[in-house]
Amino acid sequence: MKNAFFIISITAFLLMSCALTPEVIFDDKVPIEQTAWIAPVAGNITNYNTIPVNWKKKNDSATRTDNMIQIPAGNTLLEWELNSIGMDGTYYTGKGLWTSFNFQPQKVYLFFVAHENNRPGLDVYEYDFGKKIKTTYKDIEPYKIGFAPFINVSAENIVLNNSSN
């Protein structure tokens, strides 16, 4: 019985994971069930746990999720280069912005630039591997799990321009 459950679970997981394909696999030695997938729709990630990376987006659309990056699950430090419009209509640009987050295995994460308590950072959205979601504000809001503030924000490394002007 346990063997049948295990085989069914693995088969279901493999079928679900085929729904999305990562653009980048950071460490192909890590089993897929121990990874998380991230879609850096807020900008480009230039550093992963102090390791320089070149994970440039292939598409600049703020709502595209086809730029998936597969990383090991766990506590992670990411450096961002922003070029994005936040949900509030503000256009954000910046370099050298760091966030920290604990990624769970078998989850997909989306990031959108936001402000919380007058502090810039990233709204974090999470859903299960294999699930397809729309990334409009109304559709994605139930998947919001938190806010990751920028650790090192200063006037030199972030520029906010209100796009409604």
Image (spheres, rainbow, N blue to C red):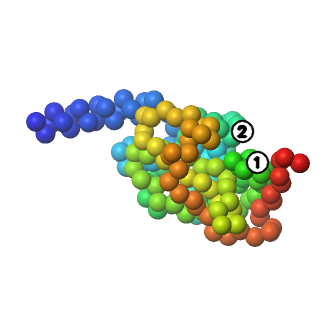
Res 60 label: 2
Tell me the residue at 14%/37% (across/down).
3
Q: Amino acid at mark 2?
A: Asp
Q: Where does residue 122 sit, x and y in percent of width and height?
A: 62, 56
Q: Secondary structure at mark 1?
A: loop
Relative placement, left or right, of 127 versus 2 is right
Q: Amino acid at mark 1?
A: Gly
Few, some or many C-alpha atoms within 10 Å of disc 1 (few <14, some 14-19, many ≥20)?
few
Relative placement, left or right, of 43 versus 156 is left
Tell me the residue at 63%/69% (across/down).
151
Tell me the residue at 47%/60% (across/down).
102
Residue 98 in view in this figure: no
Distance from disc 2 to disc 1, alpha carbons, whole Å, reads 16 Å
Furthest toward the right, the residue is 165
Q: Which residue is mark 1?
A: 89
CB under 8 Å between callouts 2 and 1? no
